[in-house]
Image: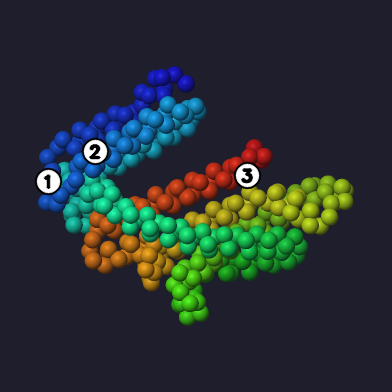
């Protein structure tokens, strides 16, 4: 890749435009923390330049440049609508610099809440996968039972897991265990359905070939059918993971004492919209990061399918 393709990008012009916007006079009645915004923008630009020098594929570099460019555009529009022209109510919509400054101030508190949310999600998710995958393999192994179970799965998966929270509060000892229970339900049905779909969709030629080789039933299930079903299993896991974060945040806003949902709810009750928006942005970033890592794991485990 040439130096021109690697470093001469529209993204750098958008970065410069964002810096020039900050030269405009502030019209907001609140402190806007322009320095925090400039420092963040420079950090994004430096990271982009550093990674640009390491990436070998032009497609990956283009994707990275587009993401950085979107960040600069959003920050520029946000800054114009708040700090520079005060179009939006500065009580409800703080400037980007103020949000970035708030994140740095509350970083310790935010990290603790992220760890709590991720820990709860991980417990419920792994427990659901550990139960749903073996169960889906055994039930999907029988075409007759699997076909009937598909309709049962559709019925239960159509019920929002969050409605079970009152029962969870009545039956379980702590709200943390209730949250794990909700995540379990949110993940179980998509993974279970995906596993059964994968088993029922395995090519009969593969099964017949294994039978010719006198493969035992356990080997047939775990060494033939399970690998062939992995793509559908991961599809169910992706769906369950996405829904889990939504439900966890909702559950934490109802009665938790930690987690990012609690962080957003607590400060919104006091009208602290700077921290509310900070929490919302952090939740989005965490979900994107977890989904990205999960997709990388999926690509690695399914590399033999390419």
Q: Tag 3 or tag 2, which sits nearer the N-term?
A: 2
The C terminus is located in which quarter? top right
Q: Which residue is mark 3?
A: 301
Tell me the SS state at disc 1.
loop
Residue 237 lies in quadrant? bottom right
Identify the residue shown where x is 28% and y is 40%: 40
Query: x, y (%) of residue 7?
Result: 38, 24
Position of residue 232 in the picture relative to residue 274 (left or right): right
Please state the horizontal and vertical placement of residue 217, each as a whole percent of the image: 81, 57
Is residue 80 among what the camera can see? no
Tell me the crowding category of disc 3: few under 14, some 14 to 19, or many 20 or more residues within 10 angstroms, Cα based: some
> Dot 2, how many residues are within 10 Å of its Cα: few (below 14), some (14-19), or many (20+)?
some
Residue 236 shown left or right of residue 166 in the figure: right
Rendered image quadrant of residue 114: bottom left
User: In the rendered image, which residue does mark 2 sit on?
Assistant: 38
Describe the element under mark 2 as helix, strand or loop.
Answer: helix
What is the C-alpha distance between the residues marked 2 and 3? 40 Å
Pointer 2 and pointer 3: residues touching (CB < 8 Å)? no
- Can the viewer see residue 55? yes
Q: Nearer the viewer, residue 229 or 113?
A: 113
| Residue at 54%, 46% in the rendered image | 295
Vertical position of residue 263 compared to residue 84: above or below: below
* Residue drawn at the location 70% of the way across and 49% of the way down: 227
Give the mark nearer the N terminus: 2 vs 1.
Answer: 1
Residue 27: assigned label? 1
Seen from the viewer's position, the closer of residues 259 and 13 is 259
- Residue 259 percent across, percent down from the top left: 39, 62
Q: CA distance from mark 1 to mark 3?
A: 53 Å
Which mark lies nearer to you, 2 or 1? 2
Residue at 18% x, 47% y is 32
């Amino acid at each position: 890749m040439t130096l021109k393709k690697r470093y001469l990008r529209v993204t750098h012009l958008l970065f410069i435009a964002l810096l020039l916007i900050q030269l405009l006079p502030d019209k907001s009645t609140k402190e806007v923390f322009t320095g925090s915004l400039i420092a963040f923008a420079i950090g994004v630009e430096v990271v982009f330049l550093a990674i640009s020098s390491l990436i070998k594929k032009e497609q990956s570099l283009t994707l990275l440049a587009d993401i950085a460019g979107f960040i600069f555009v959003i920050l520029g529009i946000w800054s114009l609508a708040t700090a520079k022209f005060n179009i939006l109510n500065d009580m409800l919509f703080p400037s980007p610099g103020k949000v970035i400054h708030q994140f740095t101030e509350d970083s310790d508190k935010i990290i603790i809440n992220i760890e709590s949310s991720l820990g709860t999600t991980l417990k419920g998710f792994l427990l659901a996968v550990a139960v749903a995958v073996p169960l889906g393999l055994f039930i999907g192994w029988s075409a007759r039972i699997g076909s009937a179970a598909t309709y049962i799965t559709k019925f239960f998966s159509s019920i929002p897991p969050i409605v079970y929270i009152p029962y969870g509060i009545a039956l379980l000892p702590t709200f943390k265990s209730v949250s794990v229970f909700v995540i379990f339900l949110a993940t179980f049905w998509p993974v279970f359905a995906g596993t059964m779909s994968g088993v029922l969709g395995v090519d009969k030629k593969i099964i017949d070939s294994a039978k010719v080789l006198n493969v035992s039933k356990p080997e047939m299930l775990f060494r033939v059918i399970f690998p062939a079903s992995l793509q559908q299993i991961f599809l169910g896991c992706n769906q369950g993971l996405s829904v889990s974060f939504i439900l966890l945040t909702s559950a934490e806003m109802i009665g938790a004492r930690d987690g990012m949902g609690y962080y957003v709810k607590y400060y919104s009750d006091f009208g602290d919209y700077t921290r509310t928006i900070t929490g919302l942005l952090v939740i989005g970033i965490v979900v994107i990061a977890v989904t990205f890592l999960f997709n990388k794991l999926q690509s690695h485990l399914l590399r033999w399918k390419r």
